[in-house]
């Protein structure tokens, strides 16, 4: 901000991206999988989930090894991975990929001008960390609390909790890259990733930093977490055909499938990016958030309008809407909002049929697809959509882009909404 307290006119551009997804762990493979319609949903191979109401999952390649993403010269960094749950490792690795893609390394950004924003929720405890403590404390069908205190708790490592707190991805990433600027973690479930990006955007254009790593990560593959969520989440019953199980906006949709992913974006001030000759993927031009209590669609529609207004564009300027649609009842309220703002003409894509529902990570991961679409001129379609009765124009196959703007929507089941507008960078 200048001395008078007015907002300095600064533009925010995306200069790096890193993805770890069920379709691949690099940008080229991720994009190729989306365009080819490669399904990421399958029966989980991580453990026996046959007795769960839904045994399907959109999981990473089982060969994922966080050490492969950390430079061999960074011995302290590799050693620190043992203090992280898988979710946190994924977030850090996506950030390393993003820094590599942006052509930056530790020290290239002045520490006080380097910010971190992450979307993450409480990470599920890994069974092995508590198994022995639980075993020694169980007597019959119940836990003996006296035994738990005397013999169980000593079996738990002192730093146990630090492996699972939602602020740990931001914490480890800031230490890793010596980022001493603004630092925050957003924990608003499925909207967390876009809300983190929106907060970074606000801070950057107000001259609080020159560069942000904005990340989001989540994995519900943990059997304890998966079992818990199977008791109240609307999951698909199409277990015999995983590749066509999740059907966004479709009349036959019957539920979603959990997934895991991590994505990190490099958000940078335009002048700084140009000065260092950075590749610029897109410009972030609008952001808005709100709370659609009761999921009526009215508030979400207004949030979309607010984001478009900030971007200085109309619905007619938008190439496509990248929807949240998870393939269950809440698709209806989102479709109502999209129809109210965009009518029946603007193409709508929804990617959870391929990627599964990765919670806090879903918004940023799906946003990458729109960034790549504007950059290359071709957008992916919606897998498993055949017919809807909402009136919106759901795109099923790949298609050429024709306009410079895209809108990304995320929301939670309680109604928290976030909307981002991006623009194809001017040549």
Image (spheres, grey):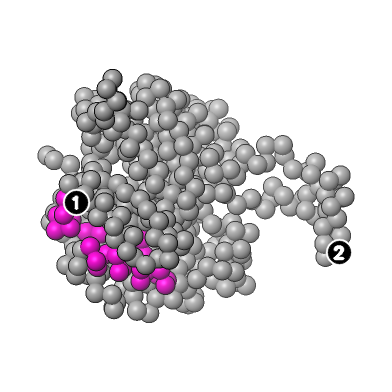
- In the displayed structure, does residue 247 sit left or right of residue 14? right
| Label 2, label 1: how far apart the Cα atoms are | 61 Å
Residue pictured at 83% horizontal, 65% vertical: 141
239 drawn magenta: no
Decide which of 376, 320 is in the foreground and name it. 320
Is residue 329 on the magenta stretch? yes
Q: Residue at x 37, y 48 (%)?
A: 194
Circle 2: element type: loop
Q: Which of the two discs, 2 and 1, labels the residue nearer the N terminus?
A: 2
- Quarter occupied by residue 268: top left
Please tell me whether residue 320 is drawn above or below residue 327 in the rendered image: above
Q: Are marks 2 and 1 in contact (CB under 8 Å)?
A: no
Residue located beneath label 1 in the image: 405
**Does the rendering let one see residue 182?**
yes
Which percent across, then down, holds residue 169?
A: 50, 39
Per the image, the residue denoted by label 2 is 140
Residue 143: % across, % down: 82, 57
Pick the quarter of the image with the N terminus: top left
Magenta-tinted stretch: 313-341
**Image quadrant occupied by the C terminus:** top left
Examine the rendered structure and indicate whether residue 359 appears above or below residue 312.
below
Residue drawn at point x = 30 percent, y = 69 percent: 336
Measuring from the top left, give residue 326's x and y in whole percent: 40, 65
Task: Return the residue nearer the eye: 380 or 204.
Answer: 204
User: From the viewer's perspective, is residue 215 above or below residue 38?
Assistant: above
Residue sitting at x 53%, y 64%? 44
């Amino acid at each position: 901000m200048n001395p008078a307290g007015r907002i300095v006119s600064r533009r925010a551009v995306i200069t790096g991206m890193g993805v770890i997804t069920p379709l691949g762990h690099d940008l080229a493979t991720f994009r190729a999988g989306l365009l080819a319609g490669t399904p990421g949903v399958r029966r989980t191979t991580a453990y026996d989930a046959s007795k769960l109401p839904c045994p399907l999952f959109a999981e990473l390649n089982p060969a994922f090894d966080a050490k492969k993403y950390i430079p061999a010269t960074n011995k302290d960094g590799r050693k620190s991975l043992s203090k992280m749950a898988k979710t946190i490792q994924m977030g850090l690795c996506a950030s390393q990929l993003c820094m590599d893609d942006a052509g930056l390394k530790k020290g290239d950004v002045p520490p006080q001008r380097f910010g971190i924003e992450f979307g993450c929720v409480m990470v599920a405890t890994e069974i092995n960390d508590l198994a022995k403590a639980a075993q020694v404390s169980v007597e019959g069908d119940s836990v003996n609390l006296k035994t738990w205190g005397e013999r169980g708790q000593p079996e738990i490592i002192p730093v146990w909790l630090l492996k699972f707190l939602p602020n740990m991805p931001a914490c480890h990433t800031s230490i890793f890259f010596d980022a001493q600027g603004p630092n925050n973690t957003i924990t608003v479930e499925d909207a967390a990733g876009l809300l983190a990006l929106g907060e970074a955007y606000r801070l950057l254009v107000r001259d609080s930093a020159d560069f942000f790593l904005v990340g989001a990560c989540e994995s519900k593959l943990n059997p304890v977490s998966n079992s818990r969520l199977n008791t109240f989440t609307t999951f698909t019953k199409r277990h015999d055909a995983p590749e066509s199980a999740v059907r966004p906006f479709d009349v036959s949709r019957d539920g979603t499938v959990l997934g895991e992913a991590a994505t990190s974006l490099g958000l940078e001030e335009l002048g700084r990016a140009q000065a260092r000759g950075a590749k610029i993927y897109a410009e972030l031009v609008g952001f808005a958030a709100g709370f659609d209590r009761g999921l009526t669609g009215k508030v979400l529609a207004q949030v979309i309008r607010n984001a478009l207004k900030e971007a200085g564009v109309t619905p007619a300027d938008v190439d496509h809407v990248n929807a949240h649609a998870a393939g269950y009842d809440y698709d209806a309220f989102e479709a109502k909002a999209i129809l109210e703002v965009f009518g029946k003409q603007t193409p709508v894509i929804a990617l959870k049929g391929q990627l599964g529902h990765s919670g806090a990570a879903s918004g940023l991961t799906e946003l990458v697809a729109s960034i790549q679409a504007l950059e290359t001129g071709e957008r992916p379609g919606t897998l498993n959509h055949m017919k809807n009765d909402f009136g919106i124009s759901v795109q099923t196959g790949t298609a050429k882009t024709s306009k410079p703007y895209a809108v990304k929507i995320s929301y939670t089941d309680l109604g928290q909404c976030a909307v981002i507008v991006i623009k194809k960078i001017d040549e």
